[in-house]
Image (cartoon, rainbow, N blue to C red):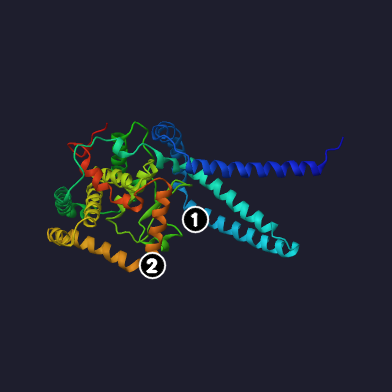
Amino acid sequence: MTPDPRGQTVTCSVLKRSVSVAAVVLAAACLWLPLSSSVVERWYSLGIYPPIQHLVTPVSNRLPFAVLDALLVLTLVLVVWGLVWTIRTARRTRSLRPVAQFLWRLVTAGAVLYLLFLALWGFNYRRVPMAQRVQFHRPSPNRAAVLALAQEAVTRMNALHDDAHRTGWTREEWQNNELRVAFAKTQRLLTDGSPAVPGRLKKTLLGPYFRWASVDGMVNPFGLEVLANPDLTPWERPFVAAHEWSHLAGYADESEANFVGWLTCVRGDPPAQYSGWLFLYWQILGELGASDRKELAMSVAPGPRQDLEAIVERLRRGQLPFLRDVSWRVYDQYLKANRVEEGVRSYSEVLTLILRTRFDEGWVPVRR
């Protein structure tokens, strides 16, 4: 007997619809259902994810373009093409069915992208938090503790400035062996998993947006690559690299990426150390009152002060305040949707981690 093509078409249509519904339901379940952090840590962050990162990041490092740029262009082309086709079909058939089908395809595509996001990187948001990974031995930090750490940051900045500038920042961060070794050592201090592969700081079509919104960098979760603001000063780049590498290592929370990035820099060469302490000083300023900030700034030597002024000038020159505020509000909601309850405030939580963590000599965190 000859197969009925109409029956095959109906079967194929039902199968596609079933797959679409399954993708949407699974994405919703992954978004809302709780997962044990210990399970995620054992099976994903230390199990499934490292081989993926070890495979994908070296490939993306060798590509002369940002994978995210190619994905964004492709997505834009497909959406515009689909929208044009939908409008033409709806006009020709005088029916809203093509519009409904197009909207359902968008929902399905969004669900699939979310599942890919989780599989390639996003489940790291649900791993064991740093507070359960290291020993705490102090109460919540008070003003005196924050000021003491700030003064240490100033002392280190002043002492490192000349050596850092003498050595310079001529090498790309992902090819800086001292920084790579420091990153690997830091990871081994915090977990028994295999160290992540450092990512190259890439230019991107999103560069103008980074400039306008005051974004220093980001990790593309679909290509496990690092994208950087093109205007970063040389002394900012080592810490930004270490911070984004920490994301590549599975530390999705911003405070934890800051913590791991800072620990990486203090183990690096003088330019990296200087960058790390410069970051910490900058971070602490946002937590101090005006009088404390003024007093602290007076102890900063002329060299580091000039470098800080260059960062301020970079930010003032490039940012669009309205876009910056909207972007950070959107990112705040993104973080909260991924169960980072503090939202963008998680950036400043690094001070709590540093001040409460028990360290051995040489800023070696003591694990639980």
Residues 220 and 340: in front is: 340
Decide if residue 98 is in sight here: yes
Relative horizontal placement of residue 230, taking residue 153 as reference (left or right) = right
Tell me the quadrant of the picture where the N terminus can be found.
Answer: top right
Name which residue type carries label 1: Asp
Q: Residue at x 63, y 42 (%)?
A: 19
* Relative vertical location of residue 38 with respect to residue 239 in this rendering, above or below: above
- Under tag 2, what secondary structure? helix
Q: Name the residue carrying label 2.
A: 322
Residue positioned 75% across, 43% down in the render: 10
Q: Earlier in the sequence, mark 1 or mark 2?
A: 1
Residue 110: horizontal and vertical position, in percent? Answer: 55, 50
- Where does label 1 land, which residue? 69
State the residue in front, 99 or 58.
Answer: 99
Task: Quadrant for the C terminus, please.
Answer: top left
Tally the numbered discs.
2
Distance (Cα) linking label 1 and label 2: 24 Å
Residue 26 position within the rendered picture, expressed as x and y whole percent measured from the top left? 55, 41
Tell me the crowding category of disc 2: few under 14, some 14 to 19, or many 20 or more residues within 10 angstroms, Cα based. few
Q: Toward which corner of the image does residue 35 lie, by quadrant?
A: top left
Q: Residues within 10 Å of mark 1 (few under 14, many from 20)?
A: some
Labels 1 and 2 touching (C-beta < 8 A): no
Q: Is residue 147 left or right of residue 4?
A: left
